[in-house]
Image: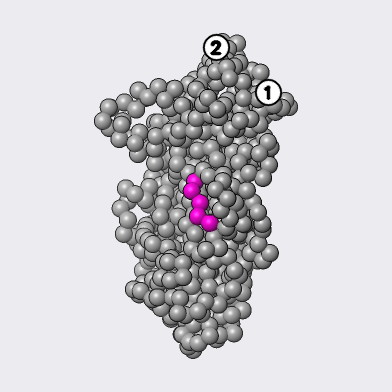
Amino acid sequence: MGNQTIKDSSTRASPNLKSRRSISKPFLNISGSHTDSPLISTSSLATTHTNVDDISIHSQGSFRSTPCGTLAHIQSQQHNNGNFDCLTAEKRWLSRELLLTQCDTTSTSFLGNNNNTNTTSITSSNCPLHHHRTNTPNDGIYIACLPFNASDDKQLSLAVGEHLTIVNYHDRNHDWVEVRNTQGQVGWVPQVFIKPLSSLDRHSWFHGKVSRCEAEYLLTQGINGSFLVRDSETVPGQLSISLRYDGRIYHYRINTDENGQYYVSTELRFATLQQLIHHHSVTTDGLVHLLLYPISKHKIQPALFKIDDKWEIPRSEIAMKQKLGGGQYGEVYEALWKRYNKVVAVKTLKETMSLQDFLEEADVMKDLKHPNLVQLLGICTLEPPYYIITEFMPHGCLLDYLKRRPRTELTSTVLMYMAGQVASAMTYLEAKNFIHRDLAARNCLVGDNHVVKVGDFGLARLVKCEDHYTAKHGAKFPIKWTAPEGLERNQFSTKSDVWSFSILLWEIATYGASPYPKIELCQVFDHLRSGNRMERPAGCPTDVYNLMQKCWRWNPDERPAFKEIHAELESMTTVGFNSQENGI
């Protein structure tokens, strides 16, 4: 990019999110919504609608629950046969798990034993799965949504799909609940690993609180007809369908009328969400493609090992392995937490650092829990060197990841997904009135499936060193990532984190390039004070660059909040929507 700069555009208007044009690669992909497909009348669909429940039932009255084939299996079959659409609708949707699953013996009470029951008689009042995430009629019954391996005799291992009842809640650690399985075994499990049996979360196609950006990332791994159902971002309580077709992602809002019926098209309504999904698996009726293959759920499993809330860990439980890196505060190692047989990361703090400052900040860190923040697991402070023990992220720092991964992997959708995750974490910290002070790609860590977590949060406060944040003593803090008020007056706030985030966004757009190339550190402040800003990176869409410029405004009060930044990044993934469908 060279030493090219442009003037600060602090007065630039916010981009119009309702009229976005196609955006250039590599940073951002197009998604769209299909609005011109012909809709056929409800009367012409009577036969199809009547046969929604023409599916086999076990003699005991419970529904079959055979999972659909995995996407990898489908893709393999597509490769071998040259046509994945040869699968029949009956085979694709044989599984009652995708319709009215886990009603068990209650199923015959509203369907009877007649496979040809007219679904129009299944009203919202008598269908047990009509309500979104309620417990009726299976109050107290939960289902395991994630696998869990017990680490001690107080915990209980979980297999996905098994039924549970809650026995007790932990007095102090609200992350854990005591449950009983169908074999009568009792033990503690992470609360986020289970959901009410009658909730939509147990359906393979329902992803819950997934952003539009994450939905598009998940669907890039799919094929034509891959889809998911998620909570609407802008209309709480409503749902949206995200559907892949011909390399693009289409989003459709699922509406409900005054009678509680579900519809995408006003001309075709259904008593249950399951009926709507099944209908559109055999008939498009306004969608760009059939809903064929539920995309695999992408759950970020929380780093929960221990039930007790004791943060001091005996040093004998930690077996240090290879060194991962180091810095002015200490070194970072991969280690094994022997008690739980879990790989963790251990940061050692130099003996010259203040233990009191460390303990105060660790007390704050333990209460920060977010899917995109590296989780603090424990500390060793009885003797030096002091340890900070955190969850382990297998792919290292984001900066190195951006540099070494092939561009074919780091597509525009992946880059936007990673940026959105960092913005989500910073929105959480902003709401907690917590300042990071050192946000950069090098301080974000990458896990499997392009999961990004902000690490080293609060490090400057964790190990306070006045000289570190005093420019006249050498400015040992990261000058190129620091806001002007930090460089000039040593003042830091959430809005200074916003400035740093925009530098990180520039790093993502350039696959890990160094900011302000060819500009010496001692020249950065004067360069910025003169109104200069970094130029738009090659391939970076104008909307993303406009967001960078807003974050680089000289006056901190004029910079957007992280909540606004996160919302704008999510909106950027929807291009070409008309005003009626934009913002779902």
Q: Give the range drawn in magenta.
A: 156-160
Mark 2 surroundings within 10 Å by alpha-carbon count, few (fewer than 14), some (14 through 19), many (20 or more): few
Q: Is residue 429 above or below residue 196?
A: below
Name the one closer to the observer, 227 or 570: 227
Name the one closer to the observer, 261 or 166: 166
In the picture of the structure, the residue carrying the numbered disc 2 is 47
The residue positioned 69% from the left and 26% from the top of the image is 126
Q: Quadrant of the C terminus?
A: top right
**Is residue 157 on the magenta stretch?**
yes
Chief secondary structure of the magenta portion: loop
The residue positioned 67% from the left and 66% from the top of the image is 172
The residue positioned 39% from the left and 37% from the top of the image is 70
Q: In this view, does 295 lie above or below 313?
A: above
Residue 480 place in picture, x, y as percent: 46, 70
- Determine if residue 20 is in view: no
**Is residue 241 on the magenta stretch?**
no
Q: Quadrant of the N terminus?
A: bottom left
Residue 58 place in picture, x, y as percent: 51, 26
Residue 273 place in picture, x, y as percent: 60, 30
> Pointer 2 and pointer 1: residues touching (CB < 8 Å)?
no
In the picture of the structure, the residue carrying the numbered disc 1 is 123
Q: What residue type is labelled 1?
A: Thr
